[in-house]
Amino acid sequence: MQITVTVNGERYTRGVEPRLLLVHFLRDDLGLTGTHWGCDTSNCGVCAVWLDGAPVKSCTVLAVMADGHEVRTVEGLAHGAELDPVQQGFVACHGLQCGFCTPGMMMTARWLLDHDPDPSEEDIREAVSGQLCRCTGYENIVRSIRWAAEHGGAARPAEEDAGREEVRT
Ligand code: FES
Ligand code: FES
C-alpha cells in the first residue's frame, strides 16, 4: 500500500508492505540509517524517533501507522550546519563510545529538554530508562544531557525549522 510520511520536514511517498516496521522504512526505504535497530524484543531503545512530537520505539510502530504523520529522526536534530546542543553535549562530555545507542539517546534527550529545560540527574536517568547503552555506564550520557541543559539546550521553537518542507517521491 502507498503511504506518505513527513520525515524531518520532507514528505516521502512510498509503496510498502503492511507488515513493514517504521525502523526499516526509515533505514531501508528512505536511507536514514541514523536510526538504529538493535533487538527483536523492543527492549533496547536504539530505534527511538519522534512520531508527531513524542518519542516512540520505531520497531514497535508499523510504517503504515505513520501514514499522514510526522516523524523526526536524528538526521533532523541539527539546525542546518549547527549541531543541536544535545549533540554538542555528547561531544563535549564523551557521551558515547561505540555510538550505537547514541541517536536514540539524543532523540529522547531532545524531547526531555523540550519539556523540562533543567532536568535533574534523576529526571534524565528516568527519561532514558527505556534505552540500553552497552558501553558507557550511563554516567557520561547523563553529563552530556546536563551539559546541553546548561548550554542553551532548552526547547527551540519548531517553527524555526518549519517552512522547509519538501516533497520527495
Ligand atoms: S530495536 Fe530494540 S527497542 Fe527497537
Ligand atoms: S555507546 Fe555503545 S551502546 Fe551506548
Image (tube, helix red, strand yellow):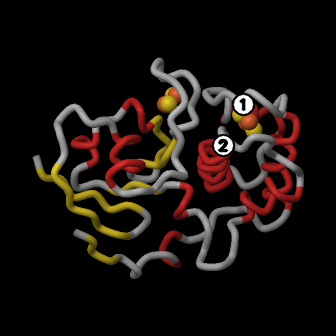
Quadrant holding the C terminus? bottom left
Q: In the rendering, at what x and y percent does residue 43 appear?
A: 54, 21
Instruction: Tell which tag, 1 or 2, sits nearer the viewer.
Output: 1
Specify whether 72 is left or right of 21.
right
Q: What residue do we see at 79% from left, 57% from top?
A: 149
Q: Within 8 Å: ligand 2 and the Cβ of disc 2?
A: yes
Q: How many marks?
A: 2
Specify whether 89 is left or right of 6.
right
Circle 1 SS class: loop
Q: Earlier in the sequence, mark 1 or mark 2?
A: 2
Name the residue type under label 2.
Met
Q: Decide: is 50 above or below 4.
A: above
Q: What residue do we see at 74% from left, 27% from top?
A: 134
Circle 2 SS class: helix
What's the distance in space between the residues labelled 1 and 2, CA to CA?
Answer: 9 Å
Q: Quadrant of residue 82?
A: bottom right
Name the foreground residue: 61 vs 54.
Answer: 61
Which residue is disc 2 drawn over? 105
Q: What residue do we see at 77% from left, 45% from top?
A: 119
Ligand 2 in which quarter: top right
Q: What residue do we see at 35% from left, 70% from top?
A: 10
Q: Within 8 Å: ligand 2 and the Cβ of disc 1?
A: yes
Q: In the rendering, at what x and y percent does residue 70 appear?
A: 35, 57
Q: Residue furthest left?
A: 1
Mark number, residue 29: none
Q: Decide: is 79 above or below 55.
A: below
Specify whether 91 is left or right of 113.
right
Name the residue type under label 1.
Cys
Which residue is disc 1 drawn over? 133
Q: In the rendering, at what x and y percent does residue 131 appear?
A: 63, 30
Mark 2 crowdedness (10 Å alpha carbons): few <14, some 14-19, many ≥20: many
Marks 2 and 1: in contact by CB < 8 Å?
yes
